Image (tube, rainbow, N blue to C red):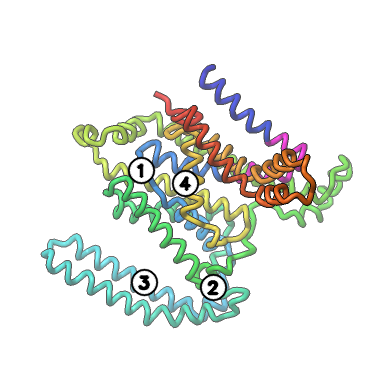
Amino acid sequence: MTDVQRRFSIFSTFFLALIFIGFFQSWNVALGIFNLCLISATMALGVNIQLGYAGIFNAGVMGFAALGGLSAVLIAHPPVSETIKLGGKGILFAFMVLAVGSAIIIFIYKSNQTSRFKKITIPLIILILLVLFNLIGSPAIKRVEAFEPAATGFLGGLGLPILFSWLVGGVLAGFVAYFIGKLTLGLRSDYLAIATLGIAEVIIYFLKNENWLTRGVKNVNGLPRPVPYEVDLQGNKWFIEICERYNFPLIETSSIVVKISYCLLFSGVLITLFILSEIALKSPWGRMMRAIRDNEISARAMGKNVKARHLEIFIIGSGIVGLAGAMLTTLEGQFTPTTYQPLRFTFTVWVMVIIGGTGNNYGSLIGGFLVWFLWVEAEPLGLYLVELLTSPLSDTNPLRIQLTTNAAHMRYIMMGLLLLLVLRFAPKGIFPEGR
């Protein structure tokens, strides 16, 4: 079987499984799973660019996804004029002070001053900046957070179309990745993983506690959509006429149309990123990145700037993850900082990349599709298998009750089993990296 035939058969099996769910569960469930699979595949593609192209082990995936979600709030949520009047100027002035101070620190760091002068001056400036920010920004932040905290208590966003936040999410994640990369990319792979995981925890801790920016654990609800609302469709005369003509249920059909609209948007983004990734992988730049990954010493001997190329790939991969985070927040319609759990969901994304095959963009697609499909469907499938196996037992049997109660945890068993089977029979993934 050729590579093309193998890809066709595996992707066809996945889509047949979705069609099966559509017929035997509901098309709403099938399309909902597919939309999440598209976002997961986008995120896996970004991680694969870092690991597969350059061998960078980034364990801070959820931090960059959270920054993408934050961009949806900052771009799409309407501004809260009352809180802006109460504390907007004070917060803006505090950040201007930080920006000026940071520029002074960078200037001193790059100057020709002695090392002793820098060691004394830079910490002193940082201390002064912290004091000034606390004096200027803290009163303004308290005023903002005290204004109707149950409903607002934050500044809001710019009120622009939420599709702009996808681009901004990628740029914001890439911008933060630049500074993180400058600090961490010189570390060994295991230390790099620990450092990026810790930084992701810091980012999410910040988002959970800065209520003036994100409402913290109270979440930001009611983000606008790039697609129609179900209620609006149900009130449109032309939509009602189509449903009556073909005898479609009005409420279910409106939900299906909305999910198909999301599907088209997410598919367009994923296909575009996939084509660009394939072009980059097969270009001289892609061959250079893999040469650096396989033998850094030889690459340096050939005059390649390894650290600069690592930083470049780290920014690109993190930007794609941030874009996926903005897409996920758009789909959910709310920003929930508590759902970003770095250790748990970073591992899930890494499983997608490993199962699909590191260094192969087709592997990222099928890994994202397959792992999220099983993550969602493992619970109903596990419950069905438990009920089937325990059917000879009575309903009051303690063993049956225990197994039925814990059937929801089957997803962890199935994920581990899938990973073990792939590593045993396909150590390089479903689609290994091509020569």
Q: CA distance from mark 2 to mark 4?
A: 28 Å
Number of numbered tags placed on the structure image = 4
According to the picture, the residue beneath numbered tag 4 turns out to be 320
Lower sequence index among marks 2 and 4 = 2
Q: Looking at the image, do the residues carrying marks 2 and 4 touch, with CB atoms under 8 Å apart?
A: no
Q: Quadrant of residue 55?
A: top left
Q: Amino acid at mark 2?
A: Phe
Say whether residue 317 is left or right of residue 118.
Answer: right
Residue at the outermost top position = 1
Lower sequence index among marks 1 and 2 = 1
According to the picture, the residue beneath numbered tag 3 turns out to be 96
Lower sequence index among marks 1 and 3 = 1
Location of residue 412 in the rendering, given as x and y in whole percent from the top left corner: 57, 46
Q: CA distance from mark 4 to mark 3?
A: 29 Å
According to the picture, the residue beneath numbered tag 1 turns out to be 56
Lower sequence index among marks 1 and 4 = 1
**SS at mark 3 in the image:** helix
Q: Amino acid at mark 1?
A: Ile
**SS at mark 1 in the image:** loop
Q: CA distance from mark 2 to mark 3?
A: 19 Å
Q: Nearer the viewer, residue 246 or 365?
A: 365
Q: Which mark is residue 27?
A: none
According to the picture, the residue beneath numbered tag 2 turns out to be 154
Queried whether the magenta region covers residue 28, the answer comes back as: yes
Mark 4 or 3: in front is: 4
Q: CA distance from mark 1 to mark 3?
A: 34 Å
Location of residue 269 in the rendering, given as x and y in whole percent from the top left corner: 55, 42
